[in-house]
Amino acid sequence: GGTSDSAATNVPWWTVFDDPQLDALVHATLEHNRDLRAALGRIERARALARADAAALLPSGSADITTGRARVPAVTSSTGQARTEDRIGASVTASWEIDLFGRLRSAAHAGDFEAAASASDLAALRAALLADVASTYFGWQGAQAQSQALTEIVTGQQKQLELARARLDLGATDELDVRRAQSELRTSEARLAGLQGELARLASSIAVLSGRFPQDLALQ
């Protein structure tokens, strides 16, 4: 019936993930971003943090420009419908968002921000805020899973290196076997350090968006 269909469409989109931690994060973000002018600043700071992190991964002197086709999810689409569009830039930004944030920045100069901005732009700002929080949270979860798996690999490689050294002392292998084990361990340790840095950056972005300090997140 029409009532059940209406109720279904009013279900918050983030609840479909059945993740209590995400639910709590979204509610805290909404609670701490009642001032939408402040929310605009938080989104821009979090995205600047992400761009700086991406730029740091580029080789020195390389161009920070990429092109491609990307799927814009319904939750961050100006029309409310998912679509595919051309995107240019290392920090992939939809063209409609550039226009949206341009209008919001202009409104931010007014004495009454919420009166100067249109209702649709304010709704889009809230949607962008929650979409950024959710996508950053899922990025954190993915990096955390990789970090845990790589930590186990490093532990195994440390044991392999110890075994190779013991075999070398007994004359059961040569120095090449030890150097190979050392190289594999160093590579994994470097990857793990990079993941730990990514986790810290993502946690900082989540904290910025939700209006809190990273140490207050207690993400699991």
Image: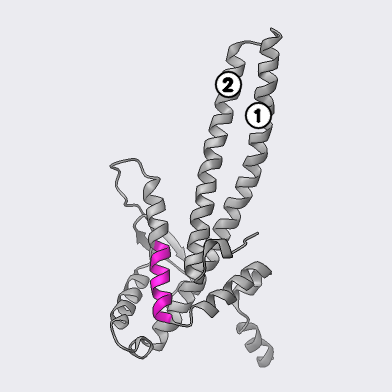
Q: Is residue 185 above or below residue 106?
A: above
For residue 180, the mark is 2
Residue at figure coordinates x 42%, y 70% from the top left = 42
- Asked whether the viewer can see residue 81, the reply is no
Asked which secondary structure carries label 2, the reply is helix
- Hey, which quadrant is residue 119 in on the image? bottom left
Q: Is 12 contained in the magenta span?
A: no
Q: Between residue 207 and residue 58, name the one nearer to us.
A: 207
Give the side of residue 40 with respect to residue 142, left or right.
Answer: left
> Which quarter of the figure has residue 21?
bottom right
What range of the chain is rendered magenta?
Answer: 36-47
For the view shown, which residue lies furthest in the top direction?
171
Identify which residue is drawn at 64% across, 41% down. 151
In the rendered view, would you say 108 is above or below 52? below
Q: Vertical placement of 214 versus 118: above or below? A: above
The mark lying in front, picked from 2 and 1, is 1
In percent of width and height, residue 32 lies at 51, 77
Which kind of residue does numbered mark 2 sit on?
Arg
Up the image or down, 125 lies above or below 56; here it is below
* Sequence order check, earlier mark of 2 and 1: 1
Is the residue marked by circle 2 packed among few (<14), some (14-19), or many (20+) residues within 10 Å? few
Instruction: Please provide percent x and percent y for residue 156.
Output: 68, 32
Our reading of the magenta stretch's main secondary structure is: helix
What is the crowding at mark 1: few (fewer than 14 residues within 10 Å), some, or many (at least 20)?
some
In the drawing, does residue 57 fall left or right of residue 149?
left
The number of numbered discs placed on residues in the rendered structure image is 2
Dot 1 corresponds to which residue?
A: 158
